[in-house]
Image: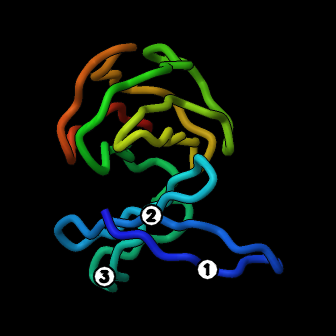
């Protein structure tokens, strides 16, 4: 993990990030986002994207601390799905859109490796 300090809204924030394959995992204030290159060949219209399977992936080795969803549960954009602890920091994973949990591959206290698919949404 790399660490940098950035000024956000006139406040100095500690940001941690890690590049894995072609993705960059960024963590700040308990929230996580993933940045990946814009691949024009893979672009789809919004209606197509809403029916696509989305995977929530562990950015690094750690321990699952909370699982707040169950298989086939409907979730709304912004819902907290699960949390994990890695490198003495807690990382929260939120739904990026309204969806249904189609696979749940972890439970509380599981030790997970980097890039493990924790759950999938459709």
Seen at 18% across and 37% down, the residue is 113
Seen at 38% across and 76% down, the residue is 43
Residue closest to the eye, 34 or 4:
4
Seen at 42% across and 69% down, the residue is 3
Quarter of the picture containing the N terminus is bottom left
Place of residue 7 in the rendered image (x, y in percent of width and height, measured from the top left): 70, 81
Q: Is residue 41 above or below residue 100?
A: below
**Front tag of 3 and 1:** 1
Seen at 59% across and 47% down, the residue is 30
**Separation of disc 3 and disc 1 at Cα?**
28 Å
Please say if the residues under marks 2 and 1 sit with CB atoms less than 8 Å apart. no
96 sits to left or right of 17: right
Which quadrant of the view contains residue 62? top left
**Front tag of 3 and 2:** 2
Q: Is residue 3 above or below residue 122?
A: below
20 sits to left or right of 100: left
SS under mark 1: strand
Quarter of the picture containing the C terminus is top left
**Separation of disc 2 and disc 1 at Cα?**
11 Å
**Separation of disc 3 and disc 2 at Cα?**
25 Å
Q: Residues within 10 Å of mark 3 (few under 14, many from 20)?
A: few
**Where does label 2 land, which residue?**
16
Q: Earlier in the sequence, mark 2 or mark 1?
A: 1
* Dot label at residue 39: 3
**Where does label 1 land, which residue?**
6
Residue closest to the eye, 57 or 72:
57
């Amino acid at each position: 993990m790399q660490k940098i300090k950035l000024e956000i809204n006139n406040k100095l924030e500690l940001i941690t990030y890690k590049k894995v394959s072609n993705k960059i995992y960024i963590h700040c204030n308990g929230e996580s986002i993933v940045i990946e290159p814009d691949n024009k060949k893979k672009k789809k219209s919004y209606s197509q994207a809403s029916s696509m399977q989305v995977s929530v992936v562990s950015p690094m080795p750690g321990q699952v601390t909370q699982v707040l969803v169950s298989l086939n549960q409907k979730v709304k954009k912004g819902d907290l799905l699960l949390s994990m602890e890695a490198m003495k920091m807690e990382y929260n994973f939120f739904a990026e859109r309204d969806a249904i949990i189609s696979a749940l591959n972890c439970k509380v206290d599981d030790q997970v490796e980097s890039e493990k698919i924790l759950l999938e949404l459709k």
